[in-house]
Amino acid sequence: MRVAVTCDHGGYALKRVVGEALRASGAEVTDLGTDTDASVDYPDYAFRALDLLRKGECDRIVLICGTGIGMSICANRIPGVRAALCHDAFTARMSRLHNDANCLVLGGRVTGPGVASDIVDVWMKTPFEAGRHAARLARIEELTARMNESGKGRGDRS
């Protein structure tokens, strides 16, 4: 499985741990940076990985910022991306079983290295259950398309 991992400065320290956990799970890992703790803009890094996922150049992605919230906002704007901000092995397991999450999001300032390794391990090993969950995911795509066609849901603050 091909997995791209990226982070901003808030996730830099955790990215190395995540990369090791991904490799231990047998993944082929592509590291998209950042490579220091110098301040960078998380959308720039998120969209690098999202573009690879969208193009099929990787099977899954892992995004890491300080809390995971900013990366989650970026990821879930892209059709077909199912990003899950996970804080423990249970949420990681459920994100795969019920939501077929193809994007794992972690908070480098709120998730310790041991917990992050456990999250990655479970997320990589857990299959999608499909069944009623597949129907729900299809419904999300249908409703999203309908909302986008009607011009609503742009996130305007006006």
Image (tube, rainbow, N blue to C red):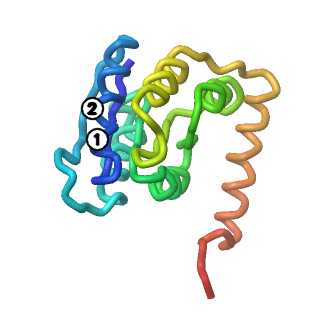
Q: So how many labels did they put on this image?
A: 2
User: In the figure, 128 relative to 51: above or below?
Assistant: above
Quarter holding the N terminus is: top left
Contact? badges 2 and 1 (CB < 8 Å): yes
Residue bearing the label numbered 2: 16
Q: Which percent across, then down, holds residue 38?
A: 19, 58
User: In the figure, 131 relative to 141: above or below?
Assistant: above
Q: Residue at x 34, y 52 (%)?
A: 10
Q: Is residue 56 left or right of residue 33?
A: right
Q: Which percent across, then down, holds residue 63?
A: 40, 43
> Amino acid type of disc 1?
Ala
**Secondary structure beneath disc 2?**
helix
User: In the figure, 40 relative to 54: above or below?
Assistant: below
Q: Is residue 145 left or right of residue 9?
A: right
Q: Residue at x 22, y 48 (%)?
A: 34
Residue bearing the label numbered 1: 13
**Neighbours of disc 1 within 10 Å: few (<14), some (14-19), many (20+):** some
150 and 58: which one is in front?
A: 58
Q: CA distance from mark 2 to mark 1?
A: 6 Å
Q: Which percent across, then down, holds residue 141?
A: 68, 46
